[in-house]
Image (cartoon, rainbow, N blue to C red):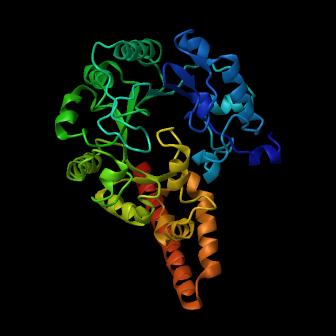
């Protein structure tokens, strides 16, 4: 029997199931933006050894003991939003490892992310100073091919009784990358029944034609995450430099139709908050939920060293001394952002502050209207939750 204290503990499953390869071949157990410690380098060791390296085991131990000492508590969206799981909510090998304090994992990772090809059709200022495309035949291109083949051989191709999820990509765009695109086109899903694929993309190259080029893995593609960062055509090329709003919206309608036809399990729209776009948060959520997205995700801007420090901080409207902070808090306090299908991640604590600020500063009548709008949204969320619960119950009966 677990103690009462143990039952209240919450755990992150990622270091027990995730394997992310970034940069020049560094391996991580989570997104390196909020878990910066590498567990090894694929250039110097095998993936199997890295998966259970000394550092990997230390990171897992920090989850089990609850210290999370390797994690960035300020920007991790799961720590900031409280979206961790109790032991009861966990299952399978992850639960077993945490329950019995096992830091060495016998099974191979269940979730593999490829994030080492920075090729992209855009040059978003928050990410890079110029467009990056690896020329075919270049040493960099060859290195990416070698890393992809190594991961494919070790973790993707071997048969598995459990689902293995491959995520492409956290570093650029899967369709702008010659290596990733060719890899996806050549995979034969019939021979990989254990494989599910998640795609992270800016959406501009994910056209009907591209979908057909991946015809052999239609049954394997699971989730699509589209990074957009704007609700208006005028803002889009500012935050997504060289982006075309009309092309994006046509492709988003196509993806929404795939989701409607149940050819995708989930369609998510992403929005990185910064000075140029924070006033569009509510509009963004409304627009893309109406279009057919399942989830809207917001996140704070992360420093990728693409801006000088003073320019980066000028974008961070949530910082204490920023001249637009009050306007940002007002935008973040909107009742619609409590919608059941909006994930605020590392903005969660700021959202609480934003609401408290509005309650403390609004005159009486606007304050009452503000409270009423939030109560109405909470009621809508309750109705959505009940509808989902009834739908699940009906599916189980059938």
- Where the N terminus falls, by quadrant? top right
- Residue 166 lies left or right of residue 311; in this view the side is left
- Residue 361 lies left or right of residue 211; in this view the side is right
Residue 341 in the image, given as x and y percentages of width and height: 45, 58
Q: Measuring 46% from the left and 55% from the top, which residue is drawn there?
A: 393
Residue 129 shows in this picture: yes
Along the viewing direction, whichever of 170 and 9 lies nearer the viewer = 170
Q: Measuring 40% from the left and 32% from the top, which residue is drawn there?
A: 169
Residue 131 in the image, given as x and y percentages of width and height: 33, 34
Q: Is residue 147 above or below residue 207?
A: above
Residue 212 in the image, given as x and y percentages of width and height: 18, 32
Along the viewing direction, whichever of 278 and 101 lies nearer the viewer = 278
Residue 45 in the image, given as x and y percentages of width and height: 57, 9
Q: Which residue occupies the extreme bottom position in the image?
A: 365
Q: Is residue 242 above or below residue 199?
A: below
Along the viewing direction, whichever of 43 and 374 lies nearer the viewer = 43
Along the viewing direction, whichever of 231 and 81 lies nearer the viewer = 231
Q: Measuring 39% from the left and 52% from the top, which residue is drawn there?
A: 229
- Residue 245 lies left or right of residue 26; in this view the side is left
Count of labels in the image? 0
- Residue 372 lies left or right of residue 247; in this view the side is right
Residue 103 shows in this picture: no
Q: Quadrant of residue 166?
A: top left
Q: Quadrant of residue 32?
A: top right
């Amino acid at each position: 029997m677990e103690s009462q204290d143990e039952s209240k503990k919450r755990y992150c499953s990622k270091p027990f199931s995730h394997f992310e390869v970034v940069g020049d071949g560094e391996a991580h157990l989570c997104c390196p933006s909020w878990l910066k410690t590498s567990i090894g380098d694929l250039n110097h060791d095998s993936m199997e050894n890295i998966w259970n390296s000394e550092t990997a085991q230390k990171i897992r131990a920090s989850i089990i003991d609850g210290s999370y000492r390797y994690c960035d508590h300020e920007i991790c969206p799961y720590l900031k939003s409280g979206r961790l799981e109790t032991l009861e909510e966990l299952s399978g090998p992850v639960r077993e490892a945490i329950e019995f304090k096992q830091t060495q994992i016998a099974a191979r990772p269940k979730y593999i992310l490829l994030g080492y090809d920075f090729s992209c059709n855009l040059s978003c200022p928050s990410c890079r100073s110029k467009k990056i495309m690896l020329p075919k035949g270049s040493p960099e291109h060859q290195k990416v091919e070698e890393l992809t083949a190594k991961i494919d051989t070790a973790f993707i191709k071997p048969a598995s009784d459990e689902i293995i999820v491959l995520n492409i990509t956290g570093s650029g765009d899967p369709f702008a990358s010659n290596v990733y695109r060719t890899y996806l086109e050549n995979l034969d899903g019939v021979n990989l029944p254990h494989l599910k694929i998640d795609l992270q993309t800016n959406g501009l190259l994910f056209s009907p034609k591209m979908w057909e080029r991946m015809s052999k893995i239609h049954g394997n593609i699971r989730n699509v995450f589209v990074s957009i960062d704007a609700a208006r055509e005028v803002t889009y090329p500012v935050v997504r430099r060289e982006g075309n709003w009309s092309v994006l919206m046509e492709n988003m309608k196509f993806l929404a139709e795939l989701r409607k036809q149940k050819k995708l399990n989930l369609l998510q729209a992403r929005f990185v908050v910064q000075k140029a776009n924070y006033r569009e948060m509510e509009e963004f959520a409304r627009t893309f939920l109406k279009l057919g997205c399942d989830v809207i995700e917001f996140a704070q801007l992360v420093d990728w060293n693409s801006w000088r420090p003073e320019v980066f901080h000028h974008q961070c409207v949530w910082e204490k001394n920023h001249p637009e902070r009050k306007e940002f808090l007002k935008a973040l306090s909107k009742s619609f952002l409590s919608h059941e299908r909006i994930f605020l991640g590392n903005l969660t604590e700021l959202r609480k502050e934003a609401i408290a600020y509005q309650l403390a500063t609004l005159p009486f009548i606007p304050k009452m209207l503000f409270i009423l709008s939030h109560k109405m949204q909470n009621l809508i969320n309750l109705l959505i939750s009940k509808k989902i619960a009834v739908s699940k119950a009906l599916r189980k009966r059938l």
